Structures are given as C-alpha cells and as structure tokens.
Image: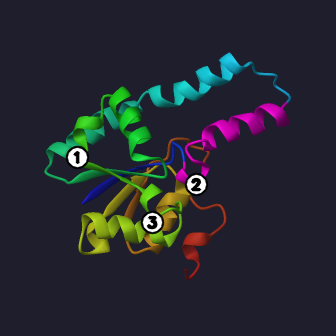
Amino acid sequence: MLVMSDAKAKRRGCNGECSRQALEYANAELKAGLSEEIKQRLLDAQFRLPAFSDALTAIPLLSRSKNFCVAFSNGTSTAVQRILTSANLAGYFSEIVSVDDVRTFKPSPAVYAYLTQRVATDARSVWLISSNGWDVIGAKSAGLRAVWVRRNPDEVLDPWGMSRMQL
C-alpha cells in the first residue's frame, strides 16, 4: 500500500474558500495591493502546479510495480483531481482519499485512521510518501510507515523533536 500525500488544496471547513482567505490575509498583511484580477490568477494557478521531476519518474514506477497508490490530501477530492490531471499524474492513482470526509485536517490522528480504514486492514501495510515533515511525523505516530521526500537540503524533518516524543 502506497500513499502519496499532498497538502495543497482547500479545506471544507472554509467552504472551499481557505485559499482565497489566506491570499486576502497575506495581501492585507504585506500591503501588497494585489488587484482582484491578479488574486484570481494566483488562485487559478494552484490547480496548474507542475509535478516535481522526481515525482514524474517515481509515481509511474510505483504504480506499475503493483502498488495500490492513492493520493491522500487535506484538499478536496475535486481539487486534488484537478491538480493531478494538470500534472499528468491522475492515471497513476487508484483513488483520492480526502480528509474532507473526516472534517479535520492532517496531522490529526483521525485522518490517518480514516486513510487506513479506506485502503488497508493494517496501518503497517500503508506507506505515506510526503515532502511535508509534519505529515510524515503524523503518519508514523498513527502507526503507518512513512518516507520523507527532502525537497530542500536545508530543511530539517523534525526541528521540534516530535518524532522522539511518546505520542
């Protein structure tokens, strides 16, 4: 069982408006003065994000190796489908598991339990692959196996020492 994880998209708790609200906040806080047109272009661009080159190689290999690959996200299923389709990766995933159904967000233990319920009988058979350290820590603390994809060589997986704590 393989799970590719992403944290890009909107949360249901905001009725699909979290990205817009975050952009409005940043625009006001930074006094950027973005026009409505620019803000809309930025919001639309989140659905056209290109895949990382290593993902374009690894995901097809994992999928063809008879792994059951699912996309697991804080985003809505619709948003994740749009992003994966735009990045030419949608065909490699058997399904999308969205925390939207649970109405809470990663790294809550409830979302990893929901993932396991949806795709496996045993949490140890699920591998989460993510570039978000907090997601990897959340998955491991819920009993899943996890791999951290280090996108930035200066980034530290666990700057707070959470993985060493009894969770």
Q: Nearer the viewer, residue 142 or 94?
A: 94
Label 2: element kind: helix
Front position in the image: 33 or 69: 33
Pointer 3 local density, CA inside 10 Å: few below 14, some 14–19, many at least 20:
many
Q: Is residue 88 left or right of residue 5?
A: left
Q: Quadrant of residue 128?
A: bottom left
On the image, the x and y values in percent for residue 126 come to: 30, 65
Dot 1: within a 10 Å radius of its alpha carbon, few (fewer than 14), some, or many (20 or more) residues? some
- Say whether marks 2 and 3 touch (CB < 8 Å): no
Q: Main secondary structure of the magenta part?
A: helix
Label located before the other in sequence (2 or 3):
2
| Among the two numbered marks 1 and 2 on one chain, the one whose residue lies closer to the N terminus | 2
Q: Which residue is mark 2?
A: 13
- The residue that label 3 is drawn on is 111
Eyeballing the image, is 3 above or below 36? below
CA–CA distance in space, label 1 to label 2: 33 Å
Front tag of 1 and 2: 2
Instruction: Tell me, yes or no, whether the two marked residues, 1 and 3, touch with CB atoms within 8 Å.
Output: no
Residue at x-position 42% and y-position 59%: 101
Name the residue that disc number 1 marks.
Answer: 62
Which region is colored magenta? 11-30
Residue at 44% x, 69% y is 140
Q: Quadrant of the N terminus?
A: bottom left
Taking the image as drawn, is residue 49 in sight? no
> Residue at left 49%, top 52%?
74
Q: Callout 3, which amino acid? A: Val
Asked if disc 1 and disc 2 are in contact, CB closer than 8 Å, the reply is no
Residue 151 sits inside the magenta stretch: no
Tell me which amino acid carries mark 1: Leu
